Image (cartoon, rainbow, N blue to C red):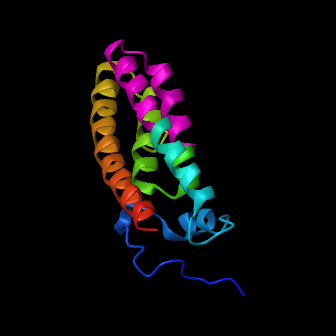
């Protein structure tokens, strides 16, 4: 039977949904080198940095539609790995980019308000991303 807890030191706080992340770890052929999951995680880290750069550019050009698309894209990637706080902020970016409220249900006409909310969500997403990236780099360096 597979070992349920991969690593007793796996402590990422509330940045990472462990049940989701452990599903990624379960795909590793070798629990010691974790090559498969490491490739997925580090691919995401690189992809997220590039997407954040695109979001900054889209914010500067006030391109709400592109911001919504980028938020949606990064929301899905971060959710797949269990990076819940990054996912939550990307979902906010997606909704405000579509001129919707945080829940995605109510319409907002004030584009400047949406841009301010996206700016706040992007700053929080990047802050949380940097925490998760540091945790992942440390985790894979120790494994």
Answer with left or right where residue 59 lies relative to residue 75: left
Point 50% across, 69% down: residue: 18
Point 36% across, 61% down: residue: 138
Answer with left or right where residue 41 lies relative to residue 52: right
> Which part of the image, by quadrant, shows the N terminus?
bottom right
The kind of secondary structure the magenta stretch mainly shows is helix
Q: Residue 124 at x, y = what percent?
A: 29, 43
Q: Residue 60 at x, y = what percent?
A: 31, 15
- Residue stretch rendered in magenta on the structure: 48-76
Q: Is residue 81 visible?
A: yes
Asked whether 4 or 143 is in front, the reply is 143
Q: Residue 125 at x, y = what percent?
A: 35, 43
Asked whether 33 or 6 is in front, the reply is 33
Q: Is residue 99 visible?
A: no
Asked whether 114 or 69 is in front, the reply is 69
Where residue 89 sits, quadrant-wise, is top left
Question: Is residue 67 in the magenta section?
Answer: yes
Is residue 131 shown above or below 117?
below
Q: Residue furthest right?
A: 1
Point 45% across, 56% down: residue: 84
Point 68% across, 83% down: residue: 2
Q: Residue furthest top?
A: 61
Where residue 111 sits, quadrant-wise, is top left
Asked whether 25 or 123 is in front, the reply is 25
């Amino acid at each position: 039977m597979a070992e349920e807890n991969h690593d007793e030191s796996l402590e990422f706080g509330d940045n990472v949904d462990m049940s989701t992340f452990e599903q990624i770890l379960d795909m590793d052929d070798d629990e010691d080198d974790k090559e498969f999951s490491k490739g997925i995680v580090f691919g995401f880290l690189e992809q997220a940095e590039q997407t954040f750069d695109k979001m900054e550019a889209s914010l500067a050009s006030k391109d709400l539609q592109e911001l919504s698309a980028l938020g949606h894209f990064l929301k899905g990637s971060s959710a797949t790995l269990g990076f819940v706080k990054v996912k939550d902020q990307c979902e906010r970016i997606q909704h405000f980019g579509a001129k919707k409220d945080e829940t995605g249900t109510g319409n907002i006409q004030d584009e400047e308000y949406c841009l301010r909310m996206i700016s706040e969500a992007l700053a929080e997403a990047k802050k949380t991303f940097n925490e998760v990236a540091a945790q992942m780099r440390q985790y894979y360096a120790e494994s």
